[in-house]
Amino acid sequence: MSFIGFLIFIVVVCVFVYSIYSSVIKAKNKAQEALSSIDVQLKKRYDLIPNILKIANKFMEHEKRLLEELTQLRTQAMNVSNKLSDSSKKIELDKQINNKMAEFMLAVENYPELKSDQTMVQAMQTFSDVEEHIAAARRFYNSAVLELNNKVEIFPFSLFASSLGITKQDFFEAQKHEIKRIDVADYIK
Amino acid sequence: MDKEEQKRLQNNFKENYFKYIKPRLDFFEQERVKSFNLFRFILAPFIILLGLLLILFLNSIKSQNDYGYVFAVIFVDLVFVFISYVILQTKLANEVKENFMPVVCKCFENLQWQHGYDNRSDEFHKVKLLDYYNRSNFDDVFIGQRNGVNFQIIEAILSRESGTGDDKKVKKIFQGVILKIDSVKEFSGNTVIRMDSLFKFDKGNLRHTELEDVVFEKKYDVFTNDEVEARYLITTAFMERINNIEQIFSAKKVFCSFANNKVYIGLEVYYDMFTLCYLNKPLNQAEFFIKMFNEIISIYKLIDHFKLTQK
């Protein structure tokens, strides 16, 4: 009887340990999945940017510097991998692109012909939709990272996290200008 | 819906009521009285019979005879009376609706009424708005447009029948109103909001997901097959609006599903909405029409509250 009891105890401990291990791995994979989903949305945005800049180029002759900076940032962002370990770099580049796009939106205000151009209106509406998807993807990522960070910091999950080399990840934070959501209608009237 | 629009609609209703409804109400009131008298004519002999049966029953107790058959006859008696009432009430209500619903709908832009719904085999279960049902009763259906977006308001009682013979059971799945509206946001997945159904809901390929709003999370569970799309559709503003739904519409339970580029909102209410008459109440008064008009207004306010016609 005592031998069976001991066996049961071992099985219970093994199941307990395995469940902790698997929950840490699941949290890591979920965060990875969330980062990939941001990637998908960011790629859509990066694909849109050249179209928007191409249209803008015809009208915004005095904003060459801004357009070139945006193009460069976009190229850099496209070259960042979608590994969890590169998420900080991705977040930083995303912040810079957001800042530049905000500058671009303000600059568009000075070009009424550009604002009323149908192709530009269409492109900006699509961009606005993509921005909403990016915001949704960020929320998903932040939710997954919160769960992962909790596992990394709380015992006994932290034991497995450190032994597997899983570390805390940064959140995607909204920029100050993003707190008021960019609305295409505000810029194109 | 702003106050100006509401006032305009109320003026339309007032004009239509006095022009097209009131002049014809007397005729239907006469029909109602005839139907009610017929019901009383059917009821009278059964009340007498009921009295006799009760006397027989009391005598049975005194003489210790078997009185089981007395109960059976009383039961059949009451069922017959109830069925008569339902048949007469339904016939009258349908006649009144056929004549007056189109007139009430004219007060609104782009709104039509029809009786019954083209139910494509448990549509509301397929989009995971509601649990499985195999019996459906659709009453009033309104089809309209609001700010260029098509919508339908469907009054429904949905239930599930199981077992056969003596083991037959009928469980009510839903009674209330379902709002079905074309989505202005494009999406391809299926996201569902249910109330406290974490362990009871047959989620199929959907996964439970948690959102940020604490108040929302206490009352509702969200299931989806696309985490990003779920958050794209259920924004923080949407969650706040669903938390405040009682301000606009009083419902026991709220269900929501995003599927097939449509938004479905189920509002469970345990009373018959859009009713214009009762067999035992005078018809030639405005109260039922005003009540029905206000019920439609509350649905419009609900569409505006959720900003379902805005991107």
Image (spheres, coloured by chain):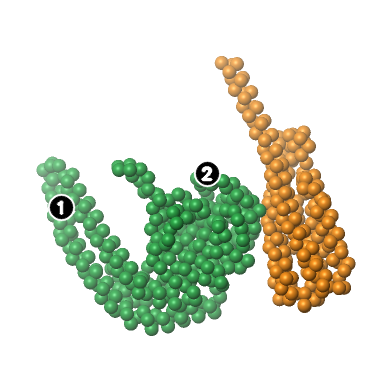
Chain colours: A orange, B green
Answer with the quarter of the image where residue A67 lies: bottom right
Residue under label 1: B53
Give the spatial CA distance, label 2 vs label 1.
50 Å
Residue B171 image point, x, y percent: 39, 49
Quick one: SS at disc 1?
Answer: helix
Tell me the kind of residue under disc 2.
Phe
Question: Would residue B270 be seen by someone viewing this image from the given angle?
Answer: no
Residue A91 visible in image: yes
Which mark, residue B199? 2
Instruction: Give the percent coordinates (x, y) of residue A40.
Output: 72, 53
Residue B244 versus residue A75: which sits nearer the camera?
A75
**Closer to the camera, B172 or A82?**
A82
In the picture, measured across the screen, residue B171 lies left or right of residue B208, that is left
Q: Amino acid at mark 1?
A: Leu
Disc 2 element? loop
> Is there one chain holding both mark 2 and mark 1?
yes
Relative horizontal placement of residue B37, taking residue A32 as reference (left or right): left
Check the image and report above or below for A154 versus B262.
above
